[in-house]
Image: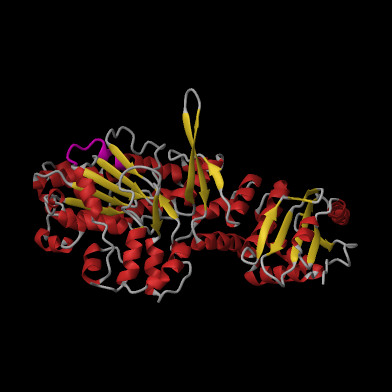
């Protein structure tokens, strides 16, 4: 048995020959016992989708069929005669779209030309089967990267027709990360152009192509409302919430327990559970396979691996479009709480800014959140399901913190943020004021200060998330005779408590008056009461007033010389 851990390789053959392999061949058996014309598997990135597709490619293709059959010896599928009867019997078109990128629609089109030309280069033998000058010209345009948009839209369907004509067998189409270029287009600002192209690209290949045997696609999202799959009557979708093949991607608990036994690392299972477990795919406990593999590859060093494999653009989008409601949601999530939402698998990207639940649908299907409970709401006409979502594990909680910090430090620098927080925790109001002003000077110009309260609260949320390991963060909670804005309750001895009240004004001349009003409010409402009950020995209480890029910070006086000291 191989014990080397594969990191960065999605090739089934090389992994079977050289590395430790978690047996996912049961997917093949399940698939051939009852499959649809088109099957879509949606899972988070780096959860084994590409390896699964590579495994299917080696299993199905006619080239080197006898040699490839050896790769499946000893695996689950080898015990299934019905499935093994399908091995090595079909021509296969295998296409991955994970690197189909471009800063503009023009550059994306050029990428598509290059990728299609490479694909057609693998099937030059079907060029001899063209039956007309038009077909020959079309093949050559694609192969020589001269095809226009209309020709490229029909490229997959055209290749499948030629392959069927050449072999006499309906080919299989495997497309890995089918939605990657759509996400790229959304993030780069040419979404409408891209969705129009890919709607035709997929429709012609799947719906209007009688030469196709069957197709399997993988991706992160269904992207259904754009009608990419319109008219497909035999489409089966397997997602993290529903559908077949729940255990096809990611490591189940049983697979994880076998893996640590095989590698002699049983003592590391608790660490792995804390960092990389916690996902729920249709009721199955799932571990992040990319992170687990990297954990073993790096001599059992527990740290965030999965979160560094892409730009985390979806989470960044949430942070860039913070509303007061999303701020409260984010506070609960990073503090270990949960939110309730109605998932909408048929959303469109352009709706993300308008509908609260769409951003959480994205975060759920992309692996940043997990489902921890489902509640059905019924009335006379409909039945709706509400999902409770939370952050799955320590690794993902770290990315929420780091992306919030990155959003801030991109404008100010980490050292300035560190100085500011050190001053805040040391009770140094003057340095806290100075550092916070520097942070504002770097950030306010790129935000809409017309929504000042939301912006400033988002800023302070960023600070508290970074301190989450040391403090329990609470916002807008009752204490004394009112509700404080933000409070940091120490989790261990020796740390002070921190209490903050915020005011926002439109004129710099009103800053001092606003600070005094905040101080009076904190004292009259007795916001320190919760700290007294908990026996916090030292409390720093800050009244903070904001105006554009300026700020005033002062400490509440008359509370036992600005600190609460108890022997």
Viewer-proximal residue, 29 or 219?
29
Q: Residue at x 56, y 46 (%)?
A: 339
Q: Position of residue 421 (x, y in %)?
A: 70, 68
Q: Quadrant of the C terminus?
A: bottom right
| Segment colored magenta | 202-212
Q: Residue at x 40, y 42 (%)?
A: 223
**414 above or below 329?**
below
Q: Position of residue 103 (x, y in %)?
A: 45, 55
Whether residue 123 is visible here, answered yes or no, is no
| Location of residue 24 by image quarter | bottom left
Q: Is residue 315 left or right of residue 180?
A: right
Q: Position of residue 519 (x, y in %)?
A: 86, 56
**323 above or below 73?**
above
Q: Is residue 226 left or right of residue 143?
A: right
208 part of magenta stretch: yes
Q: Quadrant of the N terminus?
A: bottom left
133 part of magenta stretch: no
Question: Number of numbered discs present?
Answer: 0
As drawn, the residue found furthest toward the bottom would be 299
Q: Is residue 76 left or right of residue 63?
A: right
Viewer-proximal residue, 224 or 30?
30
Q: Residue at x 41, y 55 (%)?
A: 102
Viewer-proximal residue, 217 or 185?
217
Q: Position of residue 119 (x, y in %)?
A: 23, 55
| Location of residue 269 by image quarter | bottom left
Viewer-proximal residue, 547 or 111?
547
How was this image coloured? Answer: secondary structure
**273 above or below 180?**
below
Whether residue 119 is visible here, answered yes or no, is yes
């Amino acid at each position: 048995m191989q014990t080397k851990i594969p990191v960065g390789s999605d090739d089934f053959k090389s992994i079977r020959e050289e590395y430790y392999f978690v047996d996912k061949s049961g997917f093949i058996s399940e698939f051939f016992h009852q499959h649809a014309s088109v099957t879509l598997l949606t899972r988070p990135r780096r959860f084994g989708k590409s390896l699964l597709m590579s495994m299917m490619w080696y299993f199905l293709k006619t080239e080197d069929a006898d040699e490839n059959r050896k790769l499946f010896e000893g695996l689950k599928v080898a015990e299934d005669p019905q499935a093994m009867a399908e091995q090595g019997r079909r021509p296969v078109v295998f296409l991955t779209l994970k690197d189909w990128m471009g800063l503009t629609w023009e550059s994306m089109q050029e990428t598509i030309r290059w990728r299609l030309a490479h694909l057609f280069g693998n099937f030059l033998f079907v060029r001899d089967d063209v039956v007309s000058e038009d077909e020959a010209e079309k093949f050559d345009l694609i192969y020589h990267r001269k095809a226009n948009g209309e020709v490229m839209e029909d490229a997959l369907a055209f290749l499948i027709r030629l392959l069927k004509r050449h072999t006499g067998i309906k080919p299989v189409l495997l497309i890995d990360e089918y939605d990657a270029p759509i996400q790229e287009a959304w993030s780069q600002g040419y979404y409408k152009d891209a969705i129009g192209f890919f709607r035709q690209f997929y429709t012609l290949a799947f719906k209007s192509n009688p030469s196709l045997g069957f197709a399997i696609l993988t991706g992160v999202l269904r992207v259904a409302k754009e009608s990419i799959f319109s008219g497909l009557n035999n489409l089966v979708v397997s997602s993290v919430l529903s559908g077949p093949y729940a255990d096809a991607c990611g490591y189940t608990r049983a697979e994880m327990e076998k893996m640590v036994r095989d590698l002699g690392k049983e003592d590391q299972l608790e660490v792995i559970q804390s960092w990389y477990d916690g996902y729920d795919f249709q009721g199955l406990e799932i571990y992040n396979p990319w992170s687990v593999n990297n954990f073993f590859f790096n001599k059992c060093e527990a740290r965030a691996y999965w979160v560094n494999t892409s730009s985390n653009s979806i989470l960044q989008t949430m942070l860039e479009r913070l509303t007061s409601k999303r701020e409260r949601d984010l506070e609960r999530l990073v503090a270990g709480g949960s939110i309730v939402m109605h998932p909408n698998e048929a959303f469109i990207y352009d709706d993300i800014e308008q509908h609260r639940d769409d951003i959480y649908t994205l975060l759920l299907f992309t692996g940043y959140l997990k489902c921890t409970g489902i509640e059905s709401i019924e009335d006379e006409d409909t039945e709706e399901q509400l999902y409770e979502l939370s952050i799955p594990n320590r690794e993902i909680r770290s990315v929420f913190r780091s992306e919030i910090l990155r959003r801030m430090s991109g404008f100010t620098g980490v050292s300035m943020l560190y100085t500011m927080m050190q001053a805040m925790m040391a009770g140094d109001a003057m340095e806290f004021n100075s550092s916070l002003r520097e942070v504002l000077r770097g950030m306010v110009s790129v935000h809409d200060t017309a929504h000042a309260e939301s912006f400033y609260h988002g800023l302070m949320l960023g600070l508290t998330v970074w301190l989450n390991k040391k403090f329990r963060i609470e916002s807008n909670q009752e204490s004394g005779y009112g509700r404080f804005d933000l409070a940091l309750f120490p989790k261990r001895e020796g740390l002070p408590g921190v209490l903050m009240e915020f005011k926002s004004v439109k004129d710099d001349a009103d800053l001092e008056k606003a600070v005094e009003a905040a101080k009076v409010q904190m004292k009259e409402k007795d916001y320190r009461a919760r700290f007294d009950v908990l026996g916090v020995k030292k409390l720093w209480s800050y009244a903070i007033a904001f105006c554009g890029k300026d700020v005033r910070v002062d400490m509440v006086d008359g509370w036992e010389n600005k600190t609460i000291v108890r022997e």
